[in-house]
Amino acid sequence: MDPTFTAHTDCTTVEITDPVENARFELDTASPVSPSPAPTDEFYFPVDSAIAFETSSVGVPKLANVLVRTQSGDLVADNADHVDRSLDPGAYTLELSTAPMKLYLSVESAIEVRHDEATVTVDFGGPTEVAVGARSFHDRPAGTVTTTPDPVGAMDAISLLGSALKTTSPERSFPTLRGHPPLVELGDEFDAPEGVARPDTGVRLELPADYQYVYPAASLAYYLGAEVVPADHPRLVTDAGFAYDLDGPRGYETTVGRVLRQTFFFDCVTRTEGYYDVDLHEREALDPDVGLDFADLYDRSLAERLAAYLSVPFESVADHVPDWSLTTDVMATPDNVEVLPFVADDLALVRCPGDPTGASVSPTPEPLGEFFRSGPDGAADARTADDAAEEFTRSTTDGNSSTVQQSEIFNPEPVETVEHAWVGEGFPVGANKATVESYRRRARRSAPDETSIEVHVVCNDERMNEEGVVEEFYGLRDLLRFDVSVHDELTTDELRDLLAQPADFLHYIGHVDGDGMRCPDGHLDARTLSEVNVKAFVLNACRSYAQGEALVEAGSYGGVVTLAEIANSVATDIGRTLARLLNCGFPLRVALSVVKDAIGPAYQYTTVGDGSVTLCQSESGCPLHLKIERVGEDEFEANVRAYSSPGYELGSIYLPIIGQNSVHQLVSAGDNSFRITKSELNDYFDREVMPVSYEGNLYWSDELSVEDL
């Protein structure tokens, strides 16, 4: 479904809605307008839908970044420095780069760009026809490739992942110009739909015909549009005669990951010579001694650029490459070839681990001595002043009551990326347990019918009402509509009916044990449900993994669960923090990583299904996390981390509107700090709601001022 436009006749607002991504944005006009449909082919960049109306000015909420180009694409102005400017009459395309969809204005007039403390106004000097075009960040696979259940069949399938690339120029490092790879399924013989063809990049990957070599190459083959062929030794080869050994001193998987990260990074730098000629922090930070002429490389072929990029030792650029979003462990079995298109779409670093081994998981985080939610027989203890030093958990403390066997829980090898996913048997501690079906459900995801985001908060134990305040955290947004309902003490039938109704999110607070989710009249076992229409969830109860996995199998996209017993106070803190992060636009998997950094890695929360699910988009487009350190009486060191999220995947750029900064940086970059004053920090707190880390504690910008620090 394409983005839609709504002009409110009783006010001067045009609302743009992307129903697939639950994303909304507003433009203000000088007076009420009556839009009419406009042709989409008149925009320099591709758009899905467009309207036109007459107005003398357009106001943009927040201090959005506005890029002004001629109708032929030449950049003539960028307001990253927040300086007012005027342009002579002409035909212009304006890109609003911080909108949660690709949004463009097309006008023929003079332009004046003005700034105040919170908004940007584009003034046309009088009534002017303005065309507004929007393109969703959403993308779907173009078809399904059938291949045989053997390593060579997997090679043939992976060779076609690059068919989704919308360009082979450096601009394919932008997520909207990569496209989703075709799906892959197993069959008796190889077959590819008409139109699914590998681009002619002159690059091939020669690999041993073994899943242990083939699967880790999926993301690299996709990004390079490379052909994958059998060989005795793993290497990258181009038609021009360039060859690069992939079995480096750090091992094959690490070498492949480094080639992907380095190639991608240099493309992000080289593309600043093209359509997006912006000041980029990563380019400025690069040592000139890397010896690359980016202006010359921009016009070279993909294979020629690749050879030049890999002539630079990885160690020379390692500190500047963005922190990678995701590592995905994929068990090397034939059926897991079907997950590779989704892994490649995420540009994940892929590993093929051996069989998981059993490992003990601490049942309750330290320190103990908190009030427990149930006794050994599962019966709830009564809280009194005398035993307040003890804490109840959200389940029976009898470990045998869980459907998750201790031998099935294991600790996977640690990763250096922000997120970690696992595709295979067992229950990984600290990693998102994903399946082929949960990924396929992502591709089949349809547009929501409702115009608001529906959230259900279920509290099935009155002693846990302290966490019930999460109701207040869902919906604290200006440009989004939330419908939040609270349900106390639901019976099994009531909870079953609630899960069957279409909704965006369920936040469950209560008990889980081997029989299911505890209700006043018994237990609801999610494994008995044939259909679940709640898209995502948090099951904030002890050992809720099996119930969460059952919800995903019955229809949910993904959720947050636990692998161990969790003390009530800890569960309450985590539940509140997750609610606020999800409301800020953090994906499930990223939100959980922030929680663990703030509260501690010992608390055994994890995600199941599609960990990239978001409840809504961030106000800035990508979710932000501010880390600050006092460096003087009136000065602070600020680091703004933008996390990858749907619509703002790896390769996206953003402008940290903090202090006097006017330089863009890549999403997921973490090495750019700013020296700012107390006043500038307070101004940044006021821009939007985001988590703020200071002296080991996590705060929220809407509840914080510099005077509190």
Image: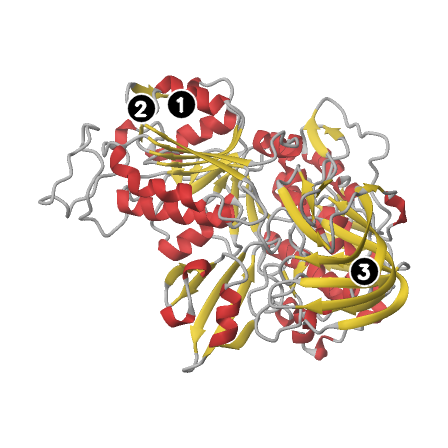
Q: Which residue is mark 3?
A: 242
Q: What is the CA distance from the residue labelled 3 to the residue labelled 2? A: 65 Å
Expressed as whole percent of the image width and height from the top left, the position of residue 101 reads 70, 48
Q: Quadrant of the N terminus?
A: top right
In space, the residues marked 3 and 1 are separated at their CA atoms by: 61 Å
Badge 3 element: loop
Instruction: Give the total number of marks visible in the rendering.
Output: 3
Q: Which residue is mark 2?
A: 519
Which label sits on residue 579?
Answer: none
Find residue 38 and report its horizontal and vertical position in percent.
Answer: 86, 43
Q: Is residue 226 visible?
A: no
Callout 3 environment at 10 Å: few (<14), some (14 to 19), or many (20+)? some
Q: Please, what is the three-letter code of the amino acid marked with disc 3?
A: Phe
Q: Check contact, mark 1 vs mark 2: CB within 8 A.
A: yes
Decide: few, some or many residues near mark 1? Use Cα within 10 Å; few <14, some 14-19, many ≥20: some
Q: What kind of residue is marked 2?
A: Cys
Q: Tell me if I can see residue 685 in this picture.
A: yes
Looking at the image, what colour scheme do you see?
A: secondary structure
Q: Which residue is mark 1?
A: 495
